[in-house]
Amino acid sequence: MGQPLAPPAAIAHLLRRAAFSAGAGTAEMESAPGYEQAVERVLATVDEPPDLLPADFDAYRPGTIQHTWLARLLAGRGALAERLAFFWHGHFATSQAKVTDGPLLWRQMELFRSQGAGRFEDLVLAVSRDVAMVRFLDGNANRKGHPNENYARELMELFALGRGAYSEHDVRELARAFSGWGSRHHEFVFTESFHDAGAKTLLGHSGSFDGEAAVKIVVGHPACAPFVCRKLARFFLAPEPPEPLIERLVVAWRATDGRVREVLRALFLDPEFRAPAHARSLVRSPVEFVVAAARLAGHAELPPAVEGSLDRLGQVLFRPPSVKGWTSGTAWLTAGTLVERLRAAQVLAEGVSVSAAEAAILREFGATPPPALRAVLSAAPVERRLALAFASPEFQLA
């Protein structure tokens, strides 16, 4: 593992992972006297409320929910709360392509933001009753005698347990437990006449349980903690996190009844998190790339040309390609998307003063950037250095 990164490099690494980047909203964390204090300041941001919505906010207007959430990400308020909302949005992926009701998707995102650091069981129960999710995975079609298995299957396969931890029988029994859970207009409803109250056997448990009891059984399954801890570690640490680290995170999970904040505390404070091998080991997704660059450049909102490029880059908020969420890793970096990233880098660097550009590069790369990048920046005119830094292979990694 080697010697852990020491401040300020460790704090910069923490902010790239837990707050998109340094920049807006991170001054208190960056100025922490030590790494452990920086971790506590990052964790405290999950309790910060979001900025007030604009007076003209209309979630039905095309593009509004995407633009407004991007503006929040740039503002940096509640840095880890927003980061977790972004993570859960990809985990419990729900798309506007099917759920065309903007207010429902916005409300789901607010759910991720407000409950994303709490008990995983509470989050799963809330998602199970979330109207956007009910519509997306056809909860209204799940009725006694004709169970719809979509949500039950994805809950076990993608959201809580992973393949191999359940059987087809478990899928059918879980679907029966959720029968009658549906929506009317914008509200969750339970229709008793649609619910199958008969005896069920789910993951080795038998009884006439309903959806709430079923969520407890699923989240209490031995496979749940390792599955979710590994997903968190892949998002915040590395594509293939070491198994001993996952085991330590599971210990934190079980000691705190599955509280995500405490799992992240254990992760951020673990020496493995600061191992040099994990620095710059995650490919920034398109949203992560443009938000990180825009915050470093001091933009209050994304330039329209950059916001418009997210579709070509392959990641539009509220529109994941499937229930499996977005891709990850080097799949983000194709010939076409790299060209688009170069264009975005140029736009994001336009109009930034030389002194502000130098400060942004220092925040992102420290006093001694990687040798190849340092050589490129040293040879370039000062007014082009920020664009080159944003376009560099090093900046594509967090």
Image (spheres, grey):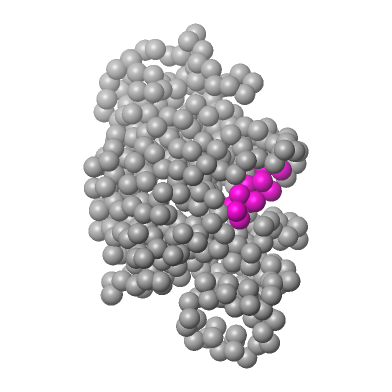
Percent position (x, y) of residue 219? Answer: 34, 35
Vertical relation: 377 (above or below) 238: below
Percent position (x, y) of residue 255? Answer: 23, 42
In magenta, the rendered stretch is 64-75
Q: Is residue 273 left or right of residue 310?
A: left
Task: From the viewer's side, name the closer residue of 165 and 226.
Answer: 226
Q: Is residue 126 left or right of residue 331?
A: left
Q: Is residue 96 left or right of residue 120?
A: right
- Is 73 included in the stretch rendered in magenta? yes
Who's the residue at 34% across and 72% down the image?
Answer: 6
Task: From the viewer's side, name the closer residue of 217 and 379.
Answer: 379
Does any portion of residue 17 appear in the rendered image?
A: no
Q: Main secondary structure of the magenta part?
A: helix
The quarter of the image holding the N terminus is: bottom left
Percent position (x, y) of residue 183? Answer: 57, 21
Vertical relation: 229 (above or below) 126: below
Task: From the viewer's side, name the closer residue of 217 and 364.
Answer: 364
